Image: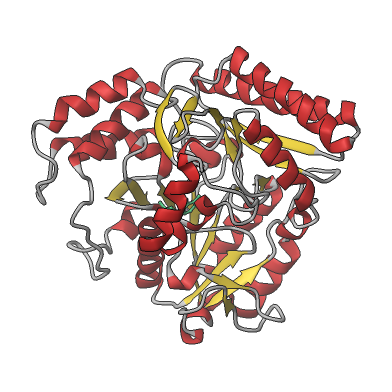
Amino acid sequence: MSRNQALFERAQLTIPGGVNSPVRAFRSVGGTPRFIERAQGPYFWDADDQRYIDYIGSWGPMILGHVHPEVLEAVQRVLGNGFSFGAPTEAEVEIAETICRLMPSIEQVRMVSSGTEATMSALRLARGFTARSRIVKFEGCYHGHADSLLVKAGSGLLTFGNPTSAGVPADIAKHTTVLEYNNIAALEEAFKAFGNEIASVIVEPVAGNMNLVRATPEFLAALRSLCSEYGAVLIFDEVMCGFRVALGGAQQVYGITPDLTCLGKVIGGGMPAAAFGGRRDIMAHLAPLGGVYQAGTLSGNPIAMAAGLKTLELIQAPGFYERLTTQTTRLVHGLVAAAREAKVPFAADSLGGMFGLYFTGKVPESFADVTKSDIARFNAFFHKMLDAGVYFAPSAYEAGFVSSTHDDAVIDATVAAAQRAFAALAA
Ligand SMILES: *Cc1c(COP(=O)(O)O)cnc(C)c1O
């Protein structure tokens, strides 16, 4: 038995499903999850010492590749000073100043430890600020696992949302309305029907949790103007796309200013750090200034701040995002060409260092489009690539990530493996 298999069997005895986050269990692709031992640059190695080119990058944070020497040094430098104090530190002021400078819509920001905490806190703040309860989200967008956000559409536009998870009370789900992504008509209809009840609209401006799906510029513009007209707080959940699609996030790419922004993943550089921030007048409602309570024992943890600050410094290097975009484009163009050669229906898209692979004829615009993917084919492709030493996301509903260490040789090796995989799929 392989060590991966042995570890997976052992893990299942004391950890539900053997993993600490469900997608890691390989349930949708089948097979044995790889237990990772170490990583370097664009690679990681599993418990059987197999090397993989890593295209998940811890689901986004590892934009500089694994164990970047300067980030490692920054972390090592603070380790001896103490792990956590429960009192403020200068590094927290520095990261707040950095975030506010890089994303000008953020006038004030609070650090938390996970993206889930960021969105949950931002929604409470929006509700406290507006003194309204209803929130609007979009099908296929993921905002962490807070109760109000694990909700899918009811049977009609004006019906209550339904929980997508056991344990979420219907009484909580009923305050969440779920609309179709990129559907402006549905959005207008919802605002017309109950716009004055909406505390907040939360959206992934570049969706990365139903595979990669871009918002259309018109959709985000409509969102912005309707929220302003009705006094609803517009929250951009940039936990994934922030500092990933561009230095200023999706809000820079689209030129749209949200009221609040949620960040995570890249801002921790692989350590547990996330944040929410935005308009000063809204942030002023947060404790200890205002009546909306929010707190965290490990918020702004000094080790996480050191990794995050160094990461945010290095991504500001001139040409960083141009190069990241070039490498990601090289990957998706290579994959599309390989699929075309083998006559396998396939499309791909990318923005900055984030990409989507679709086993369907065209790039999707909604969750319904994504579900038209040929899942069996994706799963076969995933395993062929894994066998060839390339680790893509183990689900057809996840985006992929390129780091600054994925150089031409790494990308070209990936494309060569994909040519063989697509040829085998077609055969
Ligand atoms: C990952 C993610 C979250 C949740 O972040 P966690 O740190 O996993 O809690 C929220 N929103 C988006 C868009 C994400 O990609």
Q: Nearer the viewer, residue 299 or 191?
A: 299
- Observer-nearest residue: 411 or 131? 411
Residue located 72% across and 61% down the image: 184
Residue 264 shows in this picture: yes
Q: Nearer the viewer, residue 236 or 359?
A: 359
**11 left or right of 325 in image:** left
Query: Residue drawn 43% across and 59% down?
Result: 12
Observer-nearest of 310 and 417? 417
x%, y% of residue 303?
A: 21, 37
Q: Is residue 239 visible?
A: no
Residue 408 in percent (x, y) is at 62, 13
Give the side of residue 292 with respect to residue 297, left or right.
Answer: right
Left or right, 65 with respect to 332, comes to: left
Q: Residue furthest front?
A: 1
Give the x, y percent position of residue 25. 52, 53
Q: Is residue 293 left or right of residue 406?
A: left
Residue projecting furthest to the top: 409
Residue in view at x 50 percent, y 58 percent: 22
Q: How is the image coloured?
A: secondary structure
